[in-house]
Image (tube, rainbow, N blue to C red):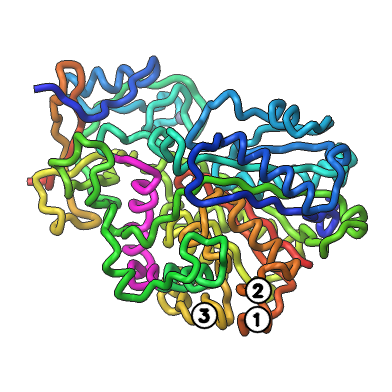
Amino acid sequence: MVYEKPLPVINEDNAPYWEYCRSHELRMQKCTDCGYVRFPVSIVCPKCNSMAAEWTPLSGKGRVYSYVVYHMAYHPSYKGDIPYIVAIIQLDEGPRMESNITDCKTEDVRIDMPVEVYFDDVTEDISLPKFRPAA
Amino acid sequence: MENIKDKAAIVGVGYTVQGKVPGRSSMSFHLEAARNAIADAGLKIEDVDGLLMQPPMAAMGDPMVAPAYLSQQLGIRVRFMAAHDDWGASAGCLAQHAAWAVVHGMANYVVCTYGENALSGAGEYGNALNGGIEYGMFGAVAGYALAARRGMHEFGTGPETWKEIAIAQRRWANLNPNARYYQQPMTVEDYYNSRMIVDPFRRADICLVSDGGRAFIVTTAERARDLRHRSVFIMGMGQDHPSTNVPQATHLAGPSGAVVSGATAFKIAGITTDDIDACEIYDCFTYTVELTLMGYGFFGPGEGKDFLKAERLAPGGDFPVNTSGGQLSEAYFQGFTPLAEAIMQLRGDAGERQLGPVTNTREPEIIIVSGNGGVLQTHSTLILRR
Ligand SMILES: [Zn+2]
């Protein structure tokens, strides 16, 4: 089955992030000068402007910071998905990221709800980090 | 620091045909708005020696919409020129840069323009702006709905408060023949029946998409006195651009860019919120109005649900907001929608919706205008007086 939904835009800078996702690892850049874990991917640390960083593994655990429910399909490939949840996840290690929350009824999602990451292998090359309620 | 207060003035406004206007390029709306602003100010083409433009958002990167082409087609020879994109904060930022330019003699009359075939053209708003499309985050609505949900959590507001904003603005639009919703009211029932788009936002919480353009002209306070319309002076100005990536942002539920931008403008103007007669607030979404007014200090966190009542914001109210109908109910031309309306109101040219005896409101002496772009990532403020 062909995956028809829009895929992430991968460039020179964020390619490692998506490579780790492909191997089902959530990693982000940690500044080796000040220790700040940053997201989205960037060549410089927004706290100290250092260019030194390592890809640190994250627990994939976090809480819902905010969420919305799409009731309109802006793209034909999402017709079968509405209503679906888009959320900002507050990760335990500090950064927040946007993603989907699945395996959760749209009326059950709450701010501060604990969630954990899983990887959705949408194509051979792309695995999307998504979240579901923590066990 | 030399004070810019009251040194520059806005002396002309250019409107275009607006709404759904197929068969027109974005450039054509810049041109129509600019020539109408020049005519409105009573200037000759050769008087205009400065040009600032906000490039169209949806047609991002359209090489045909560039300041030199605009200048070329208007037949002006300028000595001060730029394309300037702070997203929705641009109109206010253009006015600020134009003010500094005229005060320091870099130009005498600066025309500032915006135009876009956003409704009928090929472009689409917002998708590329902040990422997330792989999770089905389409449109500018995603980021703002995420901000608004967090706002509900922090401030105890939500649809119950936002309906007051939407209904009040619709009542202003009902008095504005240019507005998309001229003479078409919105009831509480209409608001709640409005289609849920991205929960917590209904259609009624989301701005219009419009074809058209707007322009205005900035000159010095002295030159303004010789022109045909009542001068509108730039009393205060400010900017603050949090810029932060949406998930990392702490400004989704305040303090937004409005706090520093507004405080800067109030300080330059030497006034407080008590001196403001009306507010023209960038209203891409109802929640943006709540967050901006809170950031300017009209009410505190948690007070919005009691403060924001339609009878106060609407015609006849003591706290008029978005008197053209705004981006929700008049038309969406980025920050040019609220800015143009503030100028018309201060000139006394707002017709049926004119603040003062016509609408049983205070005569406007001072109006605050906001600009806001990205997902609350850029912000500009102008305080204008007559
Ligand atoms: Zn650092």
Between marks 2 and 1, how big is the CA–CA gap?
Answer: 6 Å
Which of the two labelled residues, at mark 3 and mark 1, occupies the earlier sequence position?
Answer: 3
Point out residue A102 in the picture as x, y percentages from the top left corner.
13, 43
> Magenta stretch: residue B155 in it?
yes
Q: Residue at coordinates 17% horizontally, 41% vertically from top-left?
A: A79
Label 2 Cα crowd, 10 Å radius (few <14 / some 14-19 / many 20+): many
The residue that disc 1 covers is: B358
The residue that disc 3 covers is: B312
Q: Residue at coordinates 28% horizontally, 54% vertically from top-left?
A: B197
Cβ of mark 2 under 8 A from ligand 1: no
Q: Residue at coordinates 39% horizontally, 72% vertically from top-left?
A: B186
**Which residue type carries mark 3?**
Arg
Observer-side mark, 2 or 3, equals 2
> Can residue B255 be spotted in the picture?
no
Point out residue A36 in the picture as x, y percentages from the top left corner.
40, 33
Label 3 Cα crowd, 10 Å radius (few <14 / some 14-19 / many 20+): some
Task: Tell me whether the residue at label 2 lies in contact with that at label 1, contact meaning CB atoms closer than 8 angstroms.
Answer: yes
Point out residue B332 in the picture as x, y percentages from the top left corner.
51, 52
Left or right position of B92 against A65: right
Cβ of mark 3 under 8 A from ligand 1: no
Between marks 2 and 3, how big is the CA–CA gap?
Answer: 16 Å
Tag shown at residue B299: none
What stretch of residues is rendered in magenta?
B137-163
Between marks 3 and 1, how big is the CA–CA gap?
Answer: 16 Å
Quarter of the image where one finds residue A94? top left
Which of the two labelled residues, at mark 2 and mark 3, occupies the earlier sequence position?
Answer: 3
The residue that disc 2 covers is: B354
> Magenta stretch: residue A27 in it?
no
Can you say whether B308 is above or below A7 in the image? Answer: below
What chain does mark 3 sit on? B
